[in-house]
Amino acid sequence: MRKIFGTGETVLDIIFKNGQPQAAKPGGAMLNSLASLGRAGLPVYFISEYADDNVGSHIDSFLHSNGVDTSHVHHYSDGKTKLALAFLDERNDATYTFYEDYPANRLDTDMPEASRNDIVLFGSIYAITAEIRGKFTGFISQACNSGSIVIYDPNFRSAHRHELDRLKPLIIENMSMASLVRGSDEDFENIFGASTPDEAWDAIRPYCKCLVYTASAEGVYVRTEAFRGKFPVKEITPVSTIGAGDNFNAGMMAAMFINNTDVDRLSLMDGNQWRDIISAGVDFATEVCMSYENYVSREFAERSRYNTRESKPEI
């Protein structure tokens, strides 16, 4: 059976609004995606690291209770699980302050082997972190060479623009290993100075033949050698946008899994095939924006047509 892997950092998100704490949730971009997919009963495996402290134990229990396999997580004792303080503005978009205490030996875990048409998600600053990059890229390269569908979300924010000269070659290397790059308009503006989906496509096209470009309320754009299109998003008043992009990724992966999307067909798909994948991403992202949760609700997951536990009516 196909598997879904996600590799990225683990944090505890502590969410503030108007200077007051509102919630504390296990977080990290790939964790958020996998928790949503685990709730829908999909076979998900997390590759990450967190401490054997109270925070790490809480996160570990949360993942297990949501169907996420953690056998490839490094549980370290020399350090603390990372904390992320998220401060929501008037639009409920977040800015972050991080607190971390990692051990000298990072990501000390046995890496899995991905197979053809498994789905692998990676990205964010974790994917360009020097301390774990050798082991990290070894896994991504193996997945790429084995014919997995490898999805890269750069999630590159303005706080890191001062490091762009050093980090951009690593971002491009990641794109070169990906079957699909999914990024926001902010990502491509920060990395390439691209202000439109076509400019972003021109920038990544030499490295990856499939782009999904999300532009908040403006819509979602797809660019491949075979298809160019735009898809709408839903008009909502969000409670929090922290997990929106992560759950857009989760929805896309759920649709690819259920539809048996083949890696060799990915860049050749037509508008109807892309519509199903993008609409799933929009559904997941919309759902997660309606609460302080970083993942879709259990109720949404249980009634989703992507729930693999049993046949359910479509949402």
Image: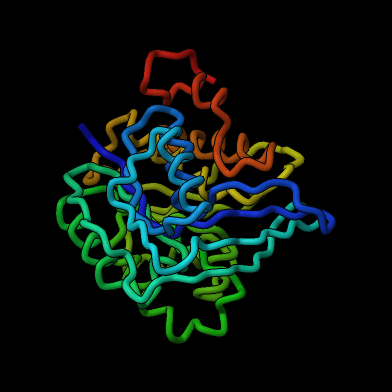
Depth check, front residue: 10 or 263: 10
Quadrant of image for the C terminus: top right
Quadrant of image for the N terminus: top left
What residue is rendered at 43% in x and 35% in y?
Answer: 37
Depth check, front residue: 56 or 228: 56
User: Residue 161, located in which quarter of the rendered image?
Assistant: bottom right
Question: Where is residue 193 drawn, in percent x and y?
Answer: 55, 75
User: Residue 296, located in which quarter of the rendered image?
Assistant: top right
In the visual, does 190 lie left or right of 41? right
Question: Where is residue 260 drawn, in percent x and y?
Answer: 27, 32
Question: Where is residue 40 drawn, in percent x and y?
Answer: 44, 28
In the visual, does 264 lie left or right of 11? left
Image height of 277 relative to 48, above or below = above
Residue 152 makes an appearance in the image: no
What residue is rendered at 49% in x and 58% in y?
Answer: 183
In the visual, does 202 lie left or right of 74? right
What residue is rendered at 49% in x and 21% in y?
Answer: 302
Depth check, front residue: 76 or 315: 76
Image height of 93 relative to 115, above or below = below
Residue 69 makes an appearance in the image: yes
How many marks overall? 0
What residue is rendered at 35% in x and 65% in y?
Answer: 175
Image height of 28 relative to 37, above or below = below
